[in-house]
């Protein structure tokens, strides 16, 4: 743990890498945006967020991690020519200067930046989160509610926060081919579309899940089936190949 923290201090921000997972249209399989997912190149090994991101969050290092990811994601967005969604943690959302940072990176009329927040990340200060999200939205940033349905107050949160995109948590999508799972996904889809939001089903892993989602009218999906998180170069090559 102490070793982990000192290694983080050594490696953040220079040894952070960002991978991107496409969100694709069910109609034609085209990517419409990507989600930025941070990785740590620690002593040659590429580490997924797993345990270290939690430690970074607890110790405040997440603020530096998050800034590095935001900067990298905004630079890569203009190469990809697709909106990039960046995950924002509770600590980062509440950190001084976060709104200014986002405003300085959002290019008016450029490729949109999307901030992904969770119910858990905003629960401590919903009113503060609302003000912050309103502010960055005025700069053209979009807001996605991530892991929707897993938090404490999904509906309460949705009514109080300015949200553009709902991401249906993958635990529901995993059960979309069972009656209960299907009912949940269907309900969230209806909720989102009635509110005029984009709805993304996350964690789509099988053709069967994709088929059910299509039949429910779900137009956006993200998951290992339609694209794994990958480095920007590989994604650029895939898009150039039309796949
Ligand atoms: O990338 P997976 O591939 O392992 O990511 C695991 C978790 O880490 C997810 O819940 C994701 O939202 C979170 N995560 C990934 N990248 C970032 C990031 O840049 N910032 C924050 N706060 N969370 C991230
Ligand atoms: O919490 P968030 O939604 O940001 O989590 C993104 C995480 O989900 C990343 O760890 C990413 O690697 C993972 N992920 C993306 N697609 C799939 C999938 O199809 N199945 C599973 N199990 N995880 C996925
Ligand atoms: Mn996310
Ligand atoms: Na999610």
Image: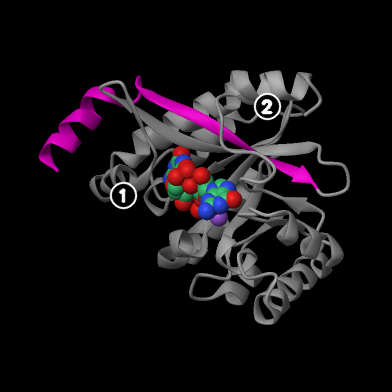
Front in this rendered view, residue 4 or 229: 229
The answer to whether residue 86 is visible is yes
Q: Is residue 9 magenta?
A: yes
| Residue 105 percent coordinates (x, y) | 58, 28
Q: How many marks?
A: 2
- The Cα–Cα distance between marks 2 and 1, rounded to whole angstroms, is 30 Å
The answer as to whether callout 2 falls within 8 Å of ligand 1 is: no
* Mark 2: few/some/many CA within 10 Å (<14, 14-19, 20+): some
Query: Residue 107 got which mark?
Result: 2
Helix, strand or loop for disc 1:
helix
| Residue 83 percent coordinates (x, y) | 70, 35
Residue lying furthest left: 2
- Which residue: 35% across, 33% down? 64
102 sits left or right of 190 in the view: left
Front in this rendered view, residue 190 or 176: 176
Helix, strand or loop for disc 2:
loop
Please report contact status of discs 2 and 1: CB closer than 8 Å, yes or no.
no
Question: Quick one: quadrant of the C terminus?
Answer: top right
| Residue 156 percent coordinates (x, y) | 59, 76
Does 38 appear above or below 16? below
For label 1, the residue is: 54
Residue 167, image quadrant: bottom right
Residue 211, image quadrant: bottom right
- Which residue: 41% across, 33% down? 39
Q: Quadrant of ligand 4?
A: bottom right
* Mark 1: few/some/many CA within 10 Å (<14, 14-19, 20+): few
Does 165 appear above or below 114? below
Q: Which residues are magenta?
A: 1-25
Front in this rendered view, residue 194 or 180: 180
| Residue 122 percent coordinates (x, y) | 47, 61
Does 128 appear above or below 83? below
Query: Residue 1 got which mark?
Result: none
């Amino acid at each position: 743990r102490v070793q982990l923290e000192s290694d983080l201090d050594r490696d953040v921000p220079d040894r952070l890498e960002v991978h991107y997972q496409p969100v694709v249209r069910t109609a034609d399989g085209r990517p419409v945006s990507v989600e930025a997912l941070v990785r740590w190149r620690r002593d040659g090994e590429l580490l997924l967020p797993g345990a270290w991101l939690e430690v970074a969050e607890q110790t405040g290092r997440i603020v530096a991690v998050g800034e590095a990811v935001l900067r990298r994601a905004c630079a890569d967005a203009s190469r990809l020519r697709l909106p990039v969604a960046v995950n924002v943690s509770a600590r980062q959302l509440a950190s001084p200067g976060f709104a200014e940072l986002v405003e300085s990176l959002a290019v008016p009329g450029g490729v949109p930046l999307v901030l992904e927040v969770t119910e858990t990340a905003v629960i401590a200060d919903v009113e503060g989160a609302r003000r912050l999200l309103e502010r960055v939205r005025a700069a053209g940033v979009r807001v996605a509610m991530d892991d929707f349905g897993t938090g404490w107050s999904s509906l309460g949160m949705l009514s109080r926060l300015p949200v553009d995109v709902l991401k249906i948590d993958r635990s529901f999508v995993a059960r979309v081919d069972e009656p209960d799972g299907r009912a949940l996904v269907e309900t969230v889809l209806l909720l989102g579309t009635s509110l005029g939001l984009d709805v993304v089903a996350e964690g789509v892993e099988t053709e069967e899940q994709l088929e059910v989602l299509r039949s429910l009218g779900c137009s956006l999906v993200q998951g290992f089936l339609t694209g794994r998180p990958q480095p920007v170069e590989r994604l650029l090559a895939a898009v150039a190949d039309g796949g």
